[in-house]
Image (cartoon, helix red, strand yellow):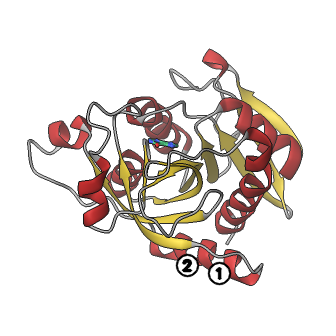
Amino acid sequence: MSIHIAAQPGDIAPAVLLPGDPLRAQFVAQTFLKEPRQYNQVRNMFGYTGLYRGRPVSVQGTGMGMPSLSIYVNELFQDFGVMRAIRIGTAGAIQEDLKLRDLVIALAAATDSGMNRIRFGGRSFAPAASFSLLQSAYDAALSRGWQAKVGTVVSSDRFYLEDPEEWKLWAQYGCLAMEMECAELYTLAAKYRREALTVLTISDSLISHEQTSSEERQSAFTRMIEVALEAAIS
Ligand code: HPA
């Protein structure tokens, strides 16, 4: 039992998928896990544990943005002994060759967040993925015939940018897409010596302003979830 997660020790598996949306946690549990059991509903931030190909896996909503994700991931690492944390989410493309519904695996995360500036006293940290989780996720995608782009993403504290062209600087430095959680997840994994990965689906483009409809998202999300689950049990 921690402040925001009303579970008993042992209720949560060593490998956890982390969608921002708690209803997506429910969808993953009901669609992909056998014998799913809900362990948390505090603040409606649902968490479930079930079996994927016979192995225990949990799925926990984190909310949107790094401060919210940080609360859940700190508690999962500190209080529940979670060893592998895999974010599944959406991102906005900032490179021309990324299309809606493409799969992105985050090798590293640049950030404009105040969180690491405060944590490291103005110095900069390099939040990076677990190599072995990344390799497993990439192999899982390729073996199913699905393309996945691997590279740096940008974790921003803001969805709505004051300067709508701000993303262009990140794009010049090769970043693939904007999202709002990865840098904090990778930083906490480094602190607690755990493994972390972020698998994303492109839901919109900051270049063309296209967006996916919710129906279009479903099949792309299914691919992302399967890749993340395969990495979780690898
Ligand atoms: N910006 C930040 N986060 C996002 C975006 C975006 O354009 N799309 C999906 N998550």
| 198 relative to 185, above or below | below
The amino acid sitting under disc 2 is Gln
Residue nearest the viewer, comparing 168 with 80: 168
Q: Which residue, given by chain and number where applicable, does mark 1 sit on?
A: 139
Q: Which residue, given by chain and number where applicable, does mark 2 sit on?
A: 135
- Side of 90 where 125 appears, left or right: left
Occupied quadrant, residue 225? bottom right
Q: Secondary structure at mark 1?
A: helix
Give the residue displayed 52% in from the left and 76% down from the top: 132
Residue nearest the viewer, comparing 214 with 68: 214
Occupied quadrant, residue 107? bottom left
Please state, as top left, top right, bottom left or bottom right, where the N terminus lies in the image: top right
Q: Are marks 2 and 1 in contact (CB under 8 Å)?
A: yes
Q: Secondary structure at mark 2?
A: helix
- Side of 107 where 144 appears, left or right: right
Q: Hey, which residue is sitting farthest right in the picture?
A: 35
Mark 2 neighbour class, 10 Å CA radius: few under 14, some 14 to 19, many 20 or more:
some
Give the residue displayed 67% in from the left and 19% down from the top: 44
Occupied quadrant, residue 227? bottom right
Task: Measuring from the top left, give residue 86's x and y in whole percent.
Answer: 57, 55
Q: Hey, which residue is sitting farthest left in the picture?
A: 122
The amino acid sitting under disc 1 is Asp
Task: Measuring from the top left, give residue 73's x and y in whole percent.
Answer: 48, 40
| 157 relative to 33, above or below | above
Task: Measuring from the top left, give residue 216's x and y in whole percent.
Answer: 76, 49
| Tag count | 2
Give the residue displayed 46% in from the left and 75% down from the top: 131
- Side of 126 where 86 appears, left or right: right
